[in-house]
Image (tube, rainbow, N blue to C red):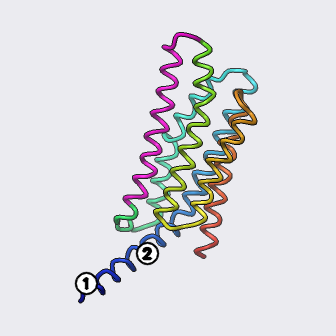
Amino acid sequence: MTAQESLKLISETMNNNRKEIVRNSGKYFVFWGVLLTIFSLLIFFLWKTTGRAVWNNLWFALPAIGYPLSRWLKGKEGAARAENFVSRINGGIWGTFGLFACSVALFTVLYGLLGSSQLTAIVLGSTLTAQIVLLFGMAETISGIALKNWAIKIAGWVTGIGGLAIFYLTQAGAEQMFIFTFAGIVLATTGLIIKHQYK
């Protein structure tokens, strides 16, 4: 086999791996989108009815519930697919997002508790939502670039920029949870588009 034939084979294998990952990711986009929508509406309802922003701490339960359920869904697929370079990159993108989102949230909560003024805590808390939705949009867009899928790229941009627009419209208060409702709907819709693309 010549060097050119080897490169062609590697390129074809990478493209096939990308397509397989995208095809299988549709249900996870729907799953995480629905879960994100449910959490955002629940937190909005509790915050709005009690007037207490402390309900935002429920966000820490999202990964605690979502990751085991996601693993369970993966287990139901039967034989595990072989992990490859593309799947490791994609996993790294979303793992990095999770690490940054949880770290930023934890930093904000701790700084708010230890900060010098209540105003500082309110300002930090209100901008946290915008920071996380931008991180989320970037992670989704980068994932779309790695997987060479326009639906995922566009959805990431719409989530990040659209979520930021909603943030500026709602500012502080329980209504900012609609940013995550919006992100969840976009994520679930992306999953449905992917499932339709790979029927």
Left or right of 190: which side holds 142? left
Name the residue furthest bottom. Answer: 1
Which residue is situated farthest in the front direction here? Answer: 4
Is 107 contained in the magenta span?
yes
The residues bearing labels 2 and 1 have C-alpha atoms spaced at a distance of: 18 Å
Q: Amino acid at mark 2?
A: Asn
Residue on which the image places disc 1: 3
Residue 69 in view here: yes
Q: Position of residue 180 (x, y in %)?
A: 65, 42
Element at badge 1? helix
* Range of residues picked out in magenta: 88-117
Q: Amino acid at mark 1?
A: Ala
Q: Dot 2 corresponds to which residue?
A: 15
Helix, strand or loop: magenta stretch = helix
Residue 65 rendering spot, x and y as whole percentages: 52, 42
Answer whether residue 45 is visible to the viewer in this image.
Answer: no
